[in-house]
Amino acid sequence: MLLALAEAAGETVPREVIYRKVWGYSMVRGDRSVDVNVKRLRDKLEQAEVELRIRTTSGVGYRLILQVAKPDETPVATL
């Protein structure tokens, strides 16, 4: 899943595209596998304390964000 998001270089990847890349076939209507696994991946990224975040584009999909911060600044940059 992380690879599918990283390959998009900061662009929003629709849930259906993620599903097809990860599981290899079309997503069944109402399937929440992508959402559940994004939640798990977010938790792992947070625990690893990396500067990667996954942002939700409501009704569309997800986008991988690289947060870059200078000392004493809030992270704001995106991929």
Image (tube, rainbow, N blue to C red):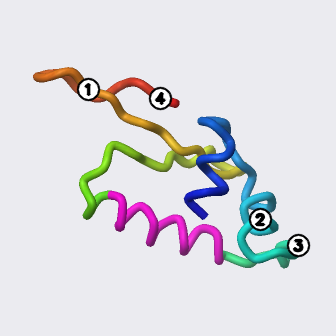
Bounds of the magenta span?
33-45
Could you tell which of marks 4 and 2 lies nearer the N-terminus? 2
**In the rendered view, would you say 74 is above or below 51?**
above
Question: The residue under label 4 is which amino acid type?
Answer: Thr
Q: Position of residue 20 (x, y in %)?
A: 81, 67
Q: CA distance from mark 3 to mark 1?
A: 38 Å
Residues at badges 3 and 1 in contact (C-beta under 8 Å)?
Answer: no
Give me the residue at 72% from left, 61% from top.
Answer: 18
Q: Dot 1: what SS?
A: loop
Q: Nearer the viewer, mark 2 or mark 3?
A: 2
Could you tell which of marks 3 and 4 lies nearer the N-terminus? 3
Q: CA distance from mark 4 to mark 1?
A: 11 Å
Query: Is disc 4 surrounded by few (<14), some (14 to 19) or many (20+) residues within 10 Å?
Result: some
Give me the residue at 13% from left, 23% from top.
Answer: 71
Q: CA distance from mark 3 to mark 4?
A: 29 Å
Give whichever of 28, 45 is nearer the camera: 45
For disc 4, the marked residue is 78
Q: Tell me the number on the disc at residue 26.
A: 3
Q: Nearer the viewer, mark 3 or mark 1?
A: 1
For disc 1, the marked residue is 69
Q: CA distance from mark 1 to mark 2?
A: 31 Å
Could you tell which of marks 4 and 1 lies nearer the N-terminus? 1
Question: The residue under label 2 is which amino acid type?
Answer: Lys
Give me the residue at 77% from left, 65% from top.
Answer: 21
Residues at badges 2 and 3 in contact (C-beta under 8 Å)?
Answer: no
Q: Is residue 25 a member of the stretch shown in magenta?
A: no
Q: Dot 3: what SS?
A: loop
For disc 2, the marked residue is 21
